[in-house]
Image (cartoon, helix red, strand yellow):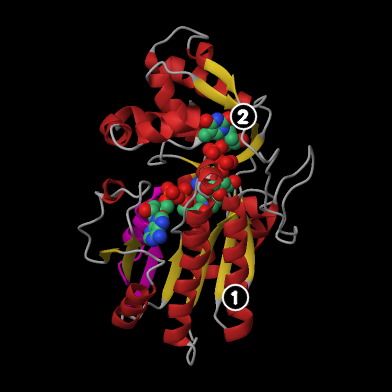
Amino acid sequence: MKKKILITGGAGFIGSHVVRLFVNTYPEYDIFNLDSLTYAGNLENLSDIDKSDNYTFLKGDITNEEYIESIFKEYRFDSVVHLAAESHVDRSITDPLSFAKTNILGSMVLLNSFKNLWQNNWNDKLFYHVSTDEVYGTLGETGLFTETTPYDPNSPYSASKASSDHFVRAYGETYGLPYVISNCSNNYGANQFPEKLIPLFINNIINNKALPVYGNGKYTRDWLYVVDHAIAIDLVFHKGKNKETYNIGGFNEWQNIDLIKLLCVQMNQKLGRSEGESEKLITYVKDRPGHDLRYAIDASKINKELGWKPSVTFEQGLSKTIDWYLNNKEWMQSIVNGDYKNYYEKQYK
Ligand code: NAD
Ligand code: DAU
């Protein structure tokens, strides 16, 4: 019997890279992509693999208990790689309840159906929760998040992800459900929705629009190329130990303003603009409430135990990312023509 793997949120940014990697690498698995296609879900992200024999798309909402229970009964998934979530911090500030619903309740519904199906036979089963480094809260000027850093989330988004991590662990302890969790830093790459810093700024540079830098721009993030995250997820899925957490990061810290300047330099070159031209678009705006000062991951555990490290430098990854957006303008256009306009006006008015 072929192993059946349910990947949730596979039409989103990271999920689509994970689905592609699994579909292409493992013809011996049947891959099911469950996604409700919110504003962030886009089946175009998977147009290159959606005809593959080992791929099935299921349109459905992880908070719909009856539906989720029914697909677990019908397909009897051996494993779950759970990525479906509301993922944008700014949206969690304006609409926290939808984050609680999807990220907490939705995760519980999945855990519960998985438990109901396999609780008398956990052999070879796995629930993998793809989580974030934001659960650890914020760092000061120094230090790194390790797997034992206490949870201290500051935004409704990170609180909802922390809560779902806790429920995964609780199901492990209470029902013996086999699980792994990974907590990853900021991803960037192709197919990222232009609400997040890098694609939003790429799009604005192309269109000569202001680049809205929150606060003083001195916030620091640790950036990882999305393909490297997908490779790490594959490794953790296959080689991670039951009940373990793995931190995933790029060994690549940037203050926002320095990152934005690098982006402007690369964009000036690619668009044939003169030196300093895109930089003129930089505009300091009101800060994000509860803005975490700094995230930085100690990824030595996954490096030592599973042999993972990022495959590209930030300069290479950023260049590939810009090229993807320049070569896929219709992808961006179909987004900015829709509800995005309203979102943008409200968020940046
Ligand atoms: P995304 O917003 O691009 O995609 C989320 C996907 O989930 C979309 O396809 C959406 O349609 C789907 N979805 C949302 N609600 C759903 C529901 N109720 N039922 C079914 N599907 C639903 O997110 P992303 O940036 O790709 O993040 C994926 C996961 O990785 C999230 O769990 C996020 O917390 C985590 N993560 C993201 C980052 C990052 O930098 N983007 C870093 C670490 C961890
Ligand atoms: O650390 C992992 C997390 O990274 C993921 O769990 C989240 O899903 C993902 O959205 C991301 O969260 P951030 O809040 O760090 O990402 P964002 O791209 O929204 O912002 C990155 C930094 O840039 C942050 O310091 C806020 C700043 N920023 C962002 C936007 C959208 C700006 O200065 N201006 C902006 O317009």
Find residue 80 and report its horizontal and vertical position in percent.
44, 70
Judged from the image, the secondary structure of the residue bearing numbered disc 1 is: loop
Is residue 142 visible in the rendered image? The answer is yes
Disc 2 versus disc 1: distance between alpha carbons?
Answer: 36 Å
In the displayed structure, 89 sits above or below 267; it is below
Q: Is mark 1 within 8 Å of ligand 1?
A: no
The kind of residue on which mark 2 rests is Asn
- Residue assigned mark 2: 256
Q: Nearer the viewer, residue 165 or 61?
A: 61
Find residue 71 and report its horizontal and vertical position in percent.
31, 76
In the displayed structure, 195 sits above or below 242; it is above
Within-10-Å neighbours for mark 1: few <14, some 14–19, many 20+: some
Find residue 300 and report its horizontal and vertical position in percent.
69, 54
Find residue 270 and report its horizontal and vertical position in percent.
40, 18
User: Residue 69 in magenta?
Assistant: no
Q: Is mark 2 within 8 Å of ligand 2?
A: yes
Question: Marks 2 and 1: which is nearer the front?
Answer: 2
Report the side of 163 relative to 343 (left or right).
Answer: right
Is residue 310 visible in the rendered image? The answer is no
Specify start and end residues of the magenta stretch as a single range. 2-29
The disc placed on residue 242 is 1
